[in-house]
Amino acid sequence: MKTLIIICLALSMVPTLADNIKDRAKSKASKYISGAFTGTEIITQLKKSNAPKARESKNAPADIDAKDKQWRAWKKGAAQPQFVKDVLDAQCSQLLAGFNSRYRFATEAFVMNNRGETICASPPTSDYDQGDEEKWFNVFVNGEDPHISEPEKDESSGEFQLQVSYPIKEGTSKLGVITIGVKTK
């Protein structure tokens, strides 16, 4: 009987522990966000990427899929396509790299536009198209603020982390989503 009570108590604590980890991750990510948006680099890059001319042909769904395949191939050792270089060299990627150095809890950070394309990243994500993933869909489409993933080992950072994702807005208009990987330890 004592064993059953101990097991029941232990199991009842699991959601509490998970919630506590998520609360800490959210708090840390909020600090990151408040610093990252003191400049204009991220908003400028989002507006450029979301502009009607940018969407017309080069960012059609088939093109996004092709870029995603090129990105994944590059991560496996293929030559770096120019668009990958452009994403990683963007001012907003450099800004994120600085914040990742400053905030040691951050394993990664990346920004996605209104179609889920990665437009800034530090370090590079494992794939380009985030539009099919919960972190983008739940925030950009469903309005979740923030979306916090379950803890897991991340493929691109190699760290056990949670991903905390927030909408990026100008006024009431959603421009994109930022995701910060937060170490669980």
Image (cartoon, rainbow, N blue to C red):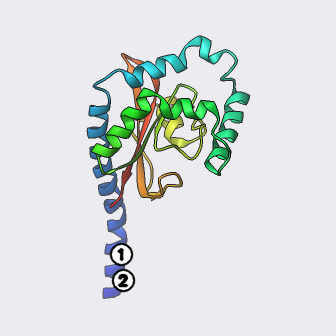
Q: Quadrant of the N terminus?
A: bottom left
Q: CA distance from mark 1 to mark 2?
A: 6 Å
**Mark 1 Cα within 10 Å, few/some/many (few <14, many 20+)?**
few
**Amino acid on which the number 1 mark rests in the picture:** Cys
Residues marked 1 and 2 touching at CB (< 8 Å): yes
Q: Nearer the viewer, residue 24 or 153?
A: 153
Would residue 82 appear left or right of 134 to someone viewing this image? right
For label 2, the SS is: helix
Name the residue rendered at 36%, 79% in the picture. Answer: 7
Would residue 141 appear left or right of 103 to someone viewing this image? right
Q: Compared to 10, does 112 lie above or below?
A: above
Question: Residue 165 sits in which quadrant?
Answer: top left
**Mark 2 Cα within 10 Å, few/some/many (few <14, many 20+)?**
few
For label 1, the SS is: helix
User: Could you tell me how many numbered marks the image carries?
Assistant: 2
Q: Nearer the viewer, residue 94 or 162?
A: 94
Question: Residue 80 sits in which quadrant?
Answer: top right
Horizontal and vertical percent for residue 99?
32, 39
Q: Which residue is mark 1?
A: 8
Q: Is residue 176 visible?
A: yes
Would residue 13 appear left or right of 148 to someone viewing this image? left
Q: Nearer the viewer, residue 10 or 24?
A: 24
Q: Quadrant of the C terminus?
A: bottom left
Horizontal and vertical percent for residue 39?
31, 23
Q: Nearer the viewer, residue 70 or 129?
A: 70
Name the residue rendered at 54%, 19% in the picture. Answer: 50
Horizontal and vertical percent for residue 47?
48, 17
Q: Which residue is mark 2?
A: 4
Q: Compared to 49, does 3 lie above or below?
A: below
